[in-house]
Image: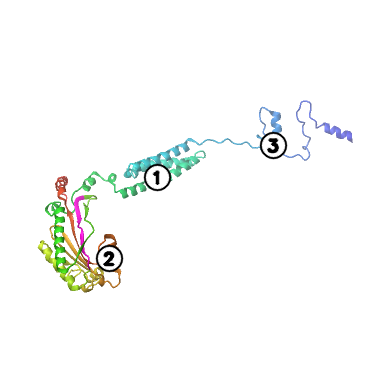
């Protein structure tokens, strides 16, 4: 029995040539099949067979110490780099355009077309495995710096600075420099009182009124605010050479609350302005003002002048531009205290008394004598403008 067993063992021993024996019919008992196909590597038959068998027995893939071969990383393709460079260059172009103030170029056909081309390149790169990472970076840059975003910033900058020159035609720029005011006769500014004449007239009228009021009623005066000169808009998007003039104001330091005294004070002012060639004072708060009684009550506190917190009188020297306003503020006719709050806010801004008589002169579209020659010269470039 032992002899038979030894003989059978001898059948499985490799021959002297080193090749493995042929397996018995039906295969070896309890043998395990390899989990994958056997791959014969050329060049080293014996070593390859051993490594393959070892890999199969351990459940690892053949070809490496760990059983798995690491695939080498492949660099990004050219399309990915093109997308990234295109996105960065496009952002740089937008920023340079914004820096030089060419806001109108941002919304031009060329810039919009360029943006579409850049977006198309980026989208194309996103669909390639090797260019997807760089395309994602380019897309992020493009989302931050695009025509809409940079154009919006440029529009805000232009609005804040008022510089719309790049978006205007030559004709619009020419109209913008018009020295007169649209819809008015440009020669009227040459025929009427100049800025200097209006200022002198205001000073003269104020001096006479103050003297008479002080002499007759004993009121003292305080100057309110400073003279204000503002360029008039010309109606074509620019500033004219004409000025809106606001004189310094004058106010009594004492309140005037008695109804009959108010009437007397206004009558005195009326007499003085008549001496200066102006029409009689016109009352905005009176019953003959032509203003709806409801509106009078809303503006002046009541329909009845005896109960009004504000009297507003006016006169001018038309066709010359001088307009004189004389107001009386009376807080004793303010039962709710709302008007006092308004006056306190105004007093905080200008320093004027809360109540009493106040006067100011306004004049619109006046021309300084120093600008007269330049004004006439500029008008030569605008024949037919009015």
Q: Residue at x 47, y 38 (%)?
A: 80
User: At 42% across and 46% down in the image, what residue appears?
Assistant: 144
Give the class, few, some or many, for how many residues have Cα within 10 Å of label 1's Cα (few <14, many ≥20): many
Q: Is residue 306 above or below residue 169?
A: below
**Magenta span main SS:** strand
Closest to the observer, 38 or 258: 258
Observer-nearest of 380 and 7: 380
Q: What separation in Å lies between label 3 and label 1 (alpha carbons)? A: 56 Å
Residue 74 is situated, as x and y percent measured from the top left of the image, at 54, 35
First in sequence, mark 3 or 2: give its number. Answer: 3
Per the image, label 3 sits on a secondary structure element best described as: helix
Using residue 6 as the reference point, say whether residue 47 is left or right of it.
Answer: left
Mark 3, mark 2: which one is toward the viewer? 2
Quadrant for residue 308, please give it. Answer: bottom left
Measure the alpha-carbon separation of dots 1 and 2: 51 Å
User: What residue does disc 1 label?
Assistant: 146
Magenta part of the chain? 240-254
């Amino acid at each position: 029995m032992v002899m038979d067993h030894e003989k059978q063992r001898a059948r499985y021993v490799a021959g002297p040539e080193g090749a493995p024996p042929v397996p018995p019919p039906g295969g070896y008992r309890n043998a395990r099949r390899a989990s994958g196909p056997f791959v014969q590597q050329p060049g080293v038959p014996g070593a390859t067979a051993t490594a393959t068998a070892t890999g199969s027995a351990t459940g690892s893939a053949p070809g490496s110490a760990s059983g798995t071969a690491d695939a080498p990383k492949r660099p990004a393709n050219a399309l990915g780099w093109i997308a990234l460079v295109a996105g960065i260059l496009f952002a740089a172009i937008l920023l340079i355009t914004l820096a030089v103030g060419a806001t109108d170029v941002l919304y031009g056909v060329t810039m919009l077309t360029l943006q579409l081309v850049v977006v198309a390149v980026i989208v194309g790169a996103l669909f390639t495995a090797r260019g997807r990472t760089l395309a994602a970076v380019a897309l992020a840059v493009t989302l931050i710096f695009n025509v809409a975003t940079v154009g919006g910033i440029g529009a805000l900058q232009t609005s804040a600075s008022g510089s719309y020159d790049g978006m205007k035609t030559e004709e619009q720029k020419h109209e913008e420099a018009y020295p007169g005011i649209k819809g008015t006769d440009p020669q009227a500014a040459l025929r009427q009182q100049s800025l200097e004449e209006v200022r002198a007239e205001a000073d003269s009228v104020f001096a006479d009124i103050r003297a008479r009021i002080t002499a007759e009623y004993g009121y003292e005066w305080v100057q309110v605010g400073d003279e204000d000169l503002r360029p008039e808009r010309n109606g074509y998007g620019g500033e004219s050479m004409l000025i809106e003039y606001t004189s310094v104001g004058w106010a009594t330091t004492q309140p005037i609350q008695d109804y009959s005294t108010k009437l007397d004070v206004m009558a005195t002012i009326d007499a003085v302005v008549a001496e200066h060639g102006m029409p009689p004072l016109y009352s905005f708060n009176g019953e003959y003002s032509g203003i709806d009684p409801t509106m009078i009550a809303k503006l002046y506190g009541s329909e009845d002048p005896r109960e009004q917190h504000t009297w507003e009188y006016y006169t001018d020297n038309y066709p010359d531009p001088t307009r004189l306003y004389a107001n009386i503020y009376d807080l004793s006719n303010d039962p709710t205290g709302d008007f006092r709050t308004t006056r306190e806010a105004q007093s905080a801004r200008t320093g004027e008394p809360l109540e009493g008589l106040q006067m100011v002169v306004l004049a619109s579209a006046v021309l300084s004598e120093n600008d007269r020659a330049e004004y006439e010269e500029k008008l030569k470039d605008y024949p037919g403008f009015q």
